[in-house]
Image: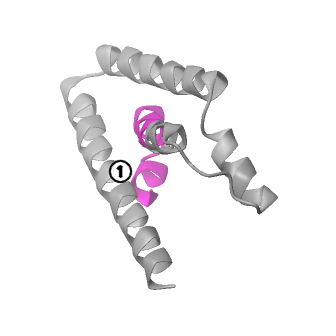
Amino acid sequence: MADARDAQSYALALTVLLVAEWLYLDWGSLPHATPADWLHAEWIDLHRGDAFAAWVQLLKDETDRVAALADDATRQRMADMFVRAVELEAEFFDATYAAGAAQ
């Protein structure tokens, strides 16, 4: 997200990364048939399992730590960025699934 990048804020970059990785962990943890294409299979495998779950937990813990140390304005910006990132990820998945259904 350009807003997080342009802010050059560790707190906001961390927030956006948390949203993306957490959603991919949830998505990767769903039961999927393994695609025949190795690239797609690898992408799914990358986003599931204990190692990836540990990575997401680290991001959650670090986000909580940074928010606890931040001032009220930064915490509010983090919360707003979290909501916006979730909205954008949802739009991405909706568009992707709609395009796949149309094929």
Q: Where is residue 7 in the image (x, y as percent from the top left)?
A: 42, 48
Residue shown at the point (34%, 58%) measured from the top left: 90
Q: Main secondary structure of the magenta part?
A: helix
Q: Position of residue 17 (x, y in %)?
A: 49, 40
Q: Residue furthest right?
A: 38
Total labels drawn? 1
Q: What stretch is highlighted in magenta?
A: 1-19
In this orientation, which residue lies closer to the viewer: 53 or 75?
53
Image: 45 above or below 38: above
Q: Where is residue 19 in the image (x, y as percent from the top left)?
A: 41, 41
In this orientation, which residue lies closer to the viewer: 88 or 13?
88
Report which quarter residue 76 is drawn in: top left
Q: Where is residue 77 in the image (x, y as percent from the top left)?
A: 26, 39
Q: How crowded is mark 1: few (under 14 residues within 10 Å), some or many (20 or more)?
A: many
Indicate the quadrant containing the N terminus: top left, top right, bottom left or bottom right.
Answer: bottom left
Q: Is residue 18 magenta?
A: yes
Residue shown at the point (48%, 33%) measured from the top left: 10
In this orientation, which residue lies closer to the viewer: 84 or 74?
84
Report which quarter residue 98 is drawn in: bottom left
Image: 103 above or below 12: below
Residue shown at the point (48%, 45%) measured from the top left: 27
Q: Does the magenta stretch include residue 36?
A: no
Residue shown at the point (46%, 54%) measured from the top left: 6
Which residue type does callout 1 highlight? Ala
Residue linked to disc 1: 85
At mark 1, the secondary structure is: helix
Q: Residue furthest bottom?
A: 103
